[in-house]
Amino acid sequence: MAAAEKTAKEKKKKDRVIVFSTPTCSYCNMAKQYFRRNKIRFKDVDVSKDPAAARDLVRRTGQMGVPVIDINGKVIVGFNKPEINRLLDIKES
Amino acid sequence: MNLDLNFGMPETEIDNTYDVIIIGGGPGGASAAIYTARADLRTLVIDKGLTAGALGITSKISNYPGVPGPISGAELVEIMREQARSFGAKFLTDKVVGVEIGEEMKTVIAGTGTYFAKALVLATGSMGRTSTVPGEEEFLGRGVSYCATCDGAFFRDQDVVVVGNNDEALEEALFLTKFASNIDLVVPTPDLKASAMLAEEALAHPKIKVRLGTRLKEIKGNGMVEGVHVHPRGGDLEHIPVRGAFVYLQGGKPITEYLMEQLETTEAGCLLVDDTMQTTVPGVFAIGDLICTHIKQAVVAASDGVIAAVAIDKYINGRKAARQDWN
């Protein structure tokens, strides 16, 4: 049990989560709150302040909308909770 | 030593905590707010705008008992809201994007912030869209958006259209003026159904071109949106070259997206409640056009609001029997 817990903790540390957002995007805030509540560390990229990041996001994902969440290279469009839970192994009570 | 007298909640969360949050400020929500506020329950109503709902967009109403009229639906809703405010209910113009109802303390996530309450009243009505135009689903996220405050930044120095006729459409169009070069406001009705102040601001803005009586027919593009086809009443089909299309149209479906499937709905998308308006989740109530079981009229929604409010008073205060508010 201890070994499994340790592995889970190590995995959480290694998960790379990036949230592409804008400050006035309430769905983005919902996603970020969800990560905070589940103690998932993430990087927040504000595409409204960074036009290069916005262009890069469109180029990489084809999406002209936020939130876009990158979890270990897998792109999720919108606050897709089931997919986020699956990729980050979050079990909601 | 750090004494946490907020019991673990950050300071802002104390101010954002209520006894009851009512989502939707039409006749159902406003009526519930009158009764919960009078029962000394700290009440917050979160509403998208006066003209977002079925009553709000009604131009003339003459059959509301006690109000001979004719009076506009928006005026009638405002009377109800003012009455609720007079008893201490707080109203916030905002859009609820999500809720969490699994815990005893419910969470409501809106554009301006996160709010908490012991009980919720869902009064969001049934003005949800039932169908999309050709190209809309194909280009969703590729130029089509339902949220300018989310996605406006992607359209810096571009031409866009905003489709809609109510407060929400106008607010979003005005927000887009920060980014877009030109905004064509495609209004399906002969007139705008928005507050006079917003309408004036939009009509006067140099970046916004208002096209009344014009319907969105199709969204065109190649990988990304490149334009829209619109049909002005009495005119020919027109093509407007744009990179973005922000759509705020309405229909007749119950509005339940913010519930994120935490409550079961019928095939028609309606919520199920018992005879006290409570859903299957304790502390969560649903009223008015959302429950679809009876006649869709303002006075019926108002009546539902009262039933829910009385049940909430009983629920929160642990009463054995419902307490009547006689006058």
Image: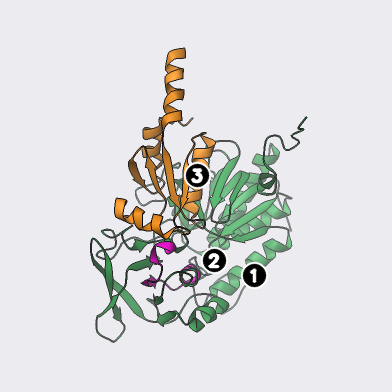
Chain colours: A orange, B green
**Which residue corresponds to the image point at 41% horizontal and 36% vertical from the top-left?**
A16
Q: Mark 2, residues whose alpha carbon is within 10 Å: few (<14), some, or many (≥20)? A: many
Say which of marks 2 and 3 sits in front: 3
In the depicted view, which residue is nearer to us: B61 or B216? B216
For the C terminus of chain B, the quadrant is: bottom right
Residue at mark 3: chain: A
Name the residue type under label 1: Ile
Q: Nearer the viewer, residue B163 or B276?
A: B163
Q: Position of residue B43 (x, y in %)?
A: 67, 52
Q: Which residue is at 44% across, 24% downward?
A: A10
Image location of residue B246, percent across then percent down? 38, 66
> Which quadrant of the view contains residue B70?
bottom right
Determine if the magenta segment contains residue B164: yes
Query: Position of B213 compared to B287: left or right?
Result: left
Residue corresponding to mark 3: A32
Could you say whether the residue bearing mark 3 is in a helix, strand or loop?
helix
Residue B225, percent from left and from top: 28, 66
Q: Is residue B120 visible?
A: yes
Which amino acid type corresponds to the residue marked 3 in the rendered image?
A: Lys
Q: Where is mark 1, residue-wise?
A: B79
Label 2 marks which chain's residue?
Answer: B
Calculate the distance from the C-alpha at mark 2 to the C-alpha at mark 1: 14 Å
Query: Residue A75 sits in which quadrant?
Result: top left
Q: Are marks 2 and 1 on the same chain?
A: yes
Describe the element under mark 2 as helix, strand or loop.
loop
In space, the residues marked 1 and 3 are separated at their CA atoms by 38 Å
Mark closer to the chain start, 2 or 1: 2
Q: Position of residue B122 (x, y in %)?
A: 53, 51
Image quadrant where one finds the N terminus of chain B: top right
Question: Which portion, as a residue range, is magenta?
Answer: B152-173
Question: Which residue matches tag 2?
Answer: B49
